[in-house]
Amino acid sequence: MNVMDDYDAKKRTAEQAVQVVRSGDWVEYTFGHGIPQSLDRALAARKSELRDVKIRWMLALRPLAVVSADPKQDAFTFMCWHFSGLDRRLCDEGLVHYIPLLYRNKPRHYRESLEVDVCMLAAPPMDKHGYFNFSLYNSSTRAMVEKATTVIVEVNEKLPVCLGGREECVHISEVDFVVEGESPDPVELPRLAPTDVDRTIAGLVVEQMQDGSTLQFGIGGMPDTIGRMICDSDLKDLGMHTEMLVDAYLDLHESGKLTNRCKNIDRGKGAFAFSIGGKGLYEWADRNPGLASYPVDYTNDPAVIAANDNVVAINNCVEVDLFGQVNSESSGLRQISGTGGQLDFTTGAYMSRGGKAFVCMSSTYTDKKTGEMRSRVVPTLDVGSIVTGPRSQSPYIVTEYGIANLHGRSTWERAERVIAIAHPQFRDALVRDAQRMGVWRRSNKACR
């Protein structure tokens, strides 16, 4: 049987395909752009027929029909590896459970620990060789497909094809059903206008870079601002090795800064695991030999990251305490995003010759309930707050007031350095906290 005959034999409507789901099953919705829309609606329509179906996904970009159909979770239980804004709201309503994750381990979790009865994914049309590409969400999709008892592909003609790398596709012979879906446009992530604080922090980080650096940008406005500032700098011959392909890399490419020719591995190519951004970014990613889609156990492996020299990893956080513990994902007990790959890249960048990892934050934020200004530098993390970055693997902490290098520093040195980049209004109180905690030594530093 040739690949087109196999394809035709496996074609089903969405309603027919989801009949394979049984009560008690574990169902994978994959990731971001790969979450299938027609199959989601068809499965939601079966709510009254099913019980105890567990559904996992990561970074939902559109509302999910199964959630809307079953807010009391009579039939479905929902779990998520990393929260988008939509997922965060669902969690606040008690509708989705977070799955703690060190991102580089995700494929291994599937291969060694997790059950997958049905894997549903959206993919670009099959190529002439019989392969469906994983488009903008390589991540751990290959591991999910390998573990699944049943694989259903929903065709989306609007998704770009992202070249590998490795583990970027599934063959028709491995697929059980094909659904020709409605092909919605990929969701675009709006770019936020940078604040003056963002620009100040970005300037501090850009000063730490050198020609030939290999860059990792995390999600959010700060890494985006840094990327834009690099475009106006004198830096050249920069490389890309990242989990997330974002708009800032396209900016660097168009400005002539991103050449990838100084990398030690994947030379000439920008390596990534998934992408969320704008339409122009997706068009750039489509069949681009200068980009390489990889699974996350490659992009986020600290040893792989460290194989390149002068790696610069740039991420955001919520708060930092006086011990140098970094919380990038929760507000107390409230989960707001996820661990993601921040610790992966903090470790890998430190291992890289000449590498540095920066975790950035504004020194303050405004409490939405009281309207008061609060410090992001805190004595200790609140009970229930998540330690995304342990004090034993501290990055460079950056606010608009400077950079705190905590590598190899004692508890009193850490406290002193972190307080020095806090907002001046809070420094005296933080010193008193440090004294009470026994992590303060009077010295000739300005803040005491």
Image (tube, rainbow, N blue to C red):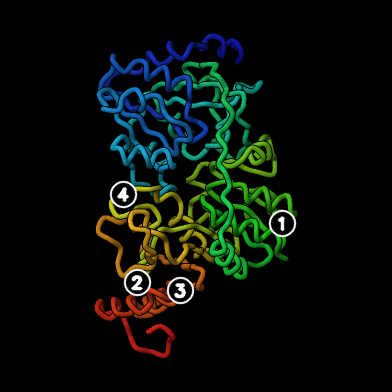
The kind of secondary structure element at disc 4 is strand
Marks 3/4 in contact by CB < 8 Å: the verdict is: no
User: Horizontal and vertical percent for residue 49?
Assistant: 29, 14
User: Horizontal and vertical percent for residue 243?
Assistant: 53, 48
Q: Which three-letter amino acid code belongs to the residue tagged 2?
A: Leu
User: Horizontal and vertical percent for residue 258?
Assistant: 69, 54
Does 91 appear above or below 72? Answer: below
Tell me the CA gap for discs 3 and 4.
26 Å
Compared across the picture, whether 160 is left or right of 138 comes to right
Does 397 appear above or below 225? Answer: below
Give the residue number, with chain letter if any, for mark 4.
334
- Label whose residue precedes the other's in the sequence (1 or 2): 1
Marks 1/2 in contact by CB < 8 Å: the verdict is: no
Tell me the CA gap for discs 4 and 2.
22 Å
Give the residue number, with chain letter if any, for mark 1.
257
Numbered tag placed on residue 46 in the rendering: none
Numbered tag placed on residue 421 in the rendering: 3
Closer to viewer: mark 4 or mark 2: 4
The kind of secondary structure element at disc 1 is loop
Q: Quadrant of residue 107?
A: top left
The kind of secondary structure element at disc 3 is loop
Q: Which three-letter amino acid code belongs to the residue tagged 4?
A: Arg
| Residue occupying the far bottom of the picture | 444
